[in-house]
Amino acid sequence: MIAAGVALARSTTAVTDSGPRVGSGPLPAAITGTVAADSSAASALPPADRAALDRASRNVAAIKPGVPVAIDIPIASPAHPGGVHAQITGHNLNPDGSLFVPSDPQQVSWARQDAKPGSSRGTAILTSHINFVINGRLVQGAMSDLAWYAQHAIGQRFTVRLADGRKLTYQFVAGREYTKEQLAASAKLRAQLYDQNKHYGPADRPSGRLLLVSCGGAFDQFTGEYEDNVFLYSLPVS
């Protein structure tokens, strides 16, 4: 799976920048995850570890996942002084496996072929434009400040509202940024970033994770694309 707008940036004349960049070092252990209990790799674990994963799976199975309909990030940022409050709509992946991105930059799309928020494993993926030109006017997207949040809001909380009325609270845990060339060249990296099989979080509270993803870095006028993708991960806290 690849993020929206993954076309390779070939020009050296990029003149517009989206803002601060996020590091691209290894993700923390809580976000790299543990192998899923029912995967083939789990059978190779020591019996005690396999039993612990089995218990963890039963514990988190009681959490009822749901379809997301809104996101509320009550954290002021440069482009969003009132925080981010956006509708979420569910969409299938594009035929090439990339994420569908709504034409309205202030809406957010959930990749409904992947995990739901509240799932016991895997990655629930939300995406939106960083910005978009509408009628000649540049409109800031719901996720225009992902890189800023990754640098200034780690540890802070936000909520995702589900179609059944429940609200799930998440905590920002880690942010990373990669060039689209890096992402296109490494299937292993893409698999790690979008994983749908592993458990995440503390060993005593394994869960799925939530990923906010959008573009970032410099804007390449040759391709009409931003050169990077920004990934902001969070874990459920209630």
Image (cartoon, rainbow, N blue to C red):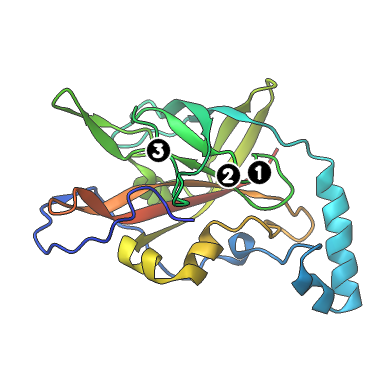
Task: Indicate which disc, 2 or 3, sits on the residue closer to the N terminus.
Answer: 3
Residue 82 drawn at (x, y percent): 38, 25
Q: Is residue 168 visible?
A: yes
- Would you call the spot at circle 3 few (<14 residues within 10 Å), some (14-19), or many (20 or more)? many
Residue labelled with disc 1:
236
Mark 3 = which residue?
Answer: 101
Look at 63% across and 61% down and name the residue there. 30
Front in this rendered view, residue 81 or 131: 131
Asked if residue 113 is positioned above or below residue 82 in the image, the reply reads below
Above or below residue 17? Residue 138 is above
The kind of residue tagged 3 is Val
Q: Nearer the viewer, mark 1 or mark 3?
A: 3
Which amino acid is tagged 1?
Pro
Q: How many marks?
A: 3
Q: Position of residue 138 (x, y in %)?
A: 19, 30
| Residue positioned 53% across, 39% down in the render | 92
Which is closer to the viewer, label 2 or label 3? 3
Residue 159 position by quadrant = top right
Q: Which mark is residue 171?
A: 2
